[in-house]
Image (tube, grey):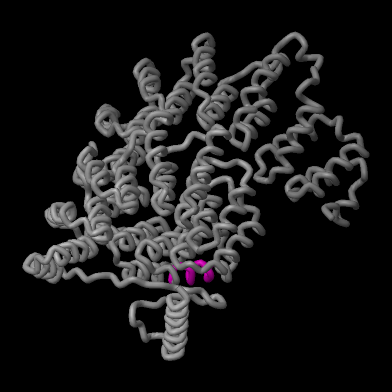
Amino acid sequence: MLLSANLNQQPWNSAIPTLVLLKKCKRSSDINQIHARLLTTGFIKNTFLTTKIILSFSTSLHAPLIEFARFIFFRHHAFEFDEKEEEEEKDPFLWNAIIKTYSHGHDPKEAMWLVSLMLENGAFADKFTLSLVLKACSRVGLVKEGMQIHGLLKKLEFGSDLFLQNCLISFYVKCGCLVRASQVFDRMPKRDSVSYNSMIDGYVKGGRIDLARVVFDCIPLEERNLISWNSLIRGYAQSEDGILVAWQLFEKMPERDLISWNSMIDGCVKCGRMEDAQGLFDRMPNRDIVSWANMIDGYAKNGRVDIARSLFDEMPERDVVAYNAMMGGYVQNGYCMEALGIFYGMQSDGNFLLDNATLLIALSAIAQLGHIDKGVAIHRFIEEIGFSLDGRLGVALIDMYSKCGSIENAMMVFENIKEKSVDHWNAIIGGLAIHGLGELAFDFLMEMERMRVEPDDITFIGLLNACGHAGLVKEGMMCFELMRRVHKVEPKLQHYGCMVDILGRAGHIEEAKNFVEEMPFEPNDVIWRSLLSACKTHESFNVGQPVAENLMRLDSPSPSSYVLASNMYAGLGKWNDVRKVRAMMKQKNLKKIPGCSWIELEGHVYAFFVQDKSHPQFSGIYSILDSLSMTDSEHSYCKNVKM
């Protein structure tokens, strides 16, 4: 109960208990108590008290309090006229407090409606009102409505106010209208550091680092501050061409903060300059979690998971971003069990709120491992927390179930998603492709068109893969033409690769070769391998020989390219060429990756290679396989005798 014994010692009709309780109020039940007290004491008509409630609750982080502030405002203030205000415009102070709950909250569009209601009700809009509306427009990209506010400002006496002009620049920048932002900036009679920094930030985010530099060089020395330097450094540090300029600016800075150091480290990491990043990290006077997470991410992307883990273990404190960086690094380098170990550690710790990124990484690890039981457990966890599957989580779940062998569960997740995006459709079509269900994948394309969901290039990669796995040559050709002629999706290298695979698998070697020759792109090693594999399978050595030669000229880093070429030359009896290819493999230290089969039993995944004897029960396994082989031989013999 909110109403304590001490507070009850005050007279029932005293406003003091209510004022004291405002700071303690958090839940709907607390609000009900305060509302009941206001009604029973008559304080609901006390303008001073209700104003205090509106101002206290409108800035709260708790949704029920914000809703109550709106309720009190609309019921007891918005439409009430004070006798003193009948002849003049009403003060917008309380209106602004409520408008801000929308412009900075979950319903920015409602701020526009509320301003219209405010003006209709006789209150006047001041600088703060219009700044709030511009904020709302920038958050949801209401360019037309924001331009209307711009037009209104030109008619108002205070429209040229520096604060409002800066709000206009910020609005146009956030909506991607850099030309209009520049026009406002150029016409400003007076500018401050906010004006300059907003333009620099806009140009940097819009990829116009050249114009950002022009603005930076125009800033008067007294207006140039850390934000100006950091914005420009961040822009230059995002590319290999600009990292040296970023270094020069960084060394010339009059002062630096954590953002300066982290921007440089981030730039070095993205450009693969880990030695420079480490040097900066070692020089930093202070580090925060972002500094550590950038380094962990950089080393992981460079394959140095051992160094990344050492840094992770050294961190004085960690947050979910650091955990995600380490998990992501493990998954990128194939250490999926280690990634899941960190995930389960986070879960058992209980001090971290797992976010979407955490769950996406965990699901990716499970998809690679094929541990469906672990995937089901995370699916339950997601449902318990109440995360929405309408976004990337739903896509990841569909992908995980598909790759773990349960297309039924993938279909179930897909069907239960209310707001399906093209990514969800792509995930389920890709899952059907993995399982060889080409005709069903094609039906899903028809369903997409019926639901008015426009397919993209990834949709057709999934469909073409599905047709290839199912041997649907006619349907594959139809998909390719639908993509180009109906949906106006320009085919990429991957689409041509899928078509070569479809034709090659079906034995249409000449058509596949012609398809490669007529491509508007230069074929890569993947396409040549696909064609060469088809030539080997269907013993089309005449086509295969020039394909093998083309593949060797590409100097592919994949061992399978050399193995295929070696087999092709062996089929042609060109043993000297076979020896040359094997010598090239040895010189490049390339080894053939052995094929692997796996099976999940009672939550454990067992992998088996050719002639593998690593399993402790290998003798029993081979004995059963031999007996099965004998049974098949006897069955075939009996069948032949009967015939």
Residue 252 visible, this orientation: no
Residue 451 visible, this orientation: yes
Please give the name of the residue rendered at 21% of the width and 60% of the height, measured from the top-left corner: 561
Q: Is residue 526 left or right of residue 415?
A: left
Closer to the camera in the image, 30 or 507 = 507
**Quadrant position of residue 491:** top left
Q: Secondary structure of the magenta portion, mostly?
A: helix
Would you say residue 509 sits in the magenta stretch? Answer: no
Q: Is residue 385 left or right of residue 279?
A: right
Relative to residue 384, is residue 598 depicted above or below? below
Relative to residue 58, is residue 392 depicted above or below? below
Closer to the camera in the image, 543 or 171 = 543
Q: Is residue 472 left or right of residue 518?
A: right
Please give the name of the residue rendered at 48% of the width and 71% of the height, measured from the top-left corner: 341
Q: Is residue 55 left or right of residue 186?
A: right
Q: Which quadrant of the rendered structure holds the N terminus?
A: bottom right
Relative to residue 333, is residue 633 depicted above or below? below
Relative to residue 82, is residue 643 depicted above or below? below
Please give the name of the residue rendered at 44% of the width and 42% of the height, measured from the top-left corner: 459
Range shown magenta:
338-346
Closer to the camera in the image, 340 or 197 = 340
**Quadrant position of residue 324:** bottom left
What percent of the width, then of the height, locates residue 549? 12, 55
Q: Which quadrant of the rendered structure holds the C terminus?
A: bottom left
Please give the name of the residue rendered at 84% of the width and 46% of the height, measured from the top-left corner: 17
**Quadrant position of residue 378:** bottom right
What percent of the width, then of the height, locates residue 144? 51, 19
What percent of the width, then of the height, locates residue 546? 13, 52
Closer to the camera in the image, 587 or 567 = 567
What percent of the width, then of the height, locates residue 272? 25, 55
- Total residue callouts: 0
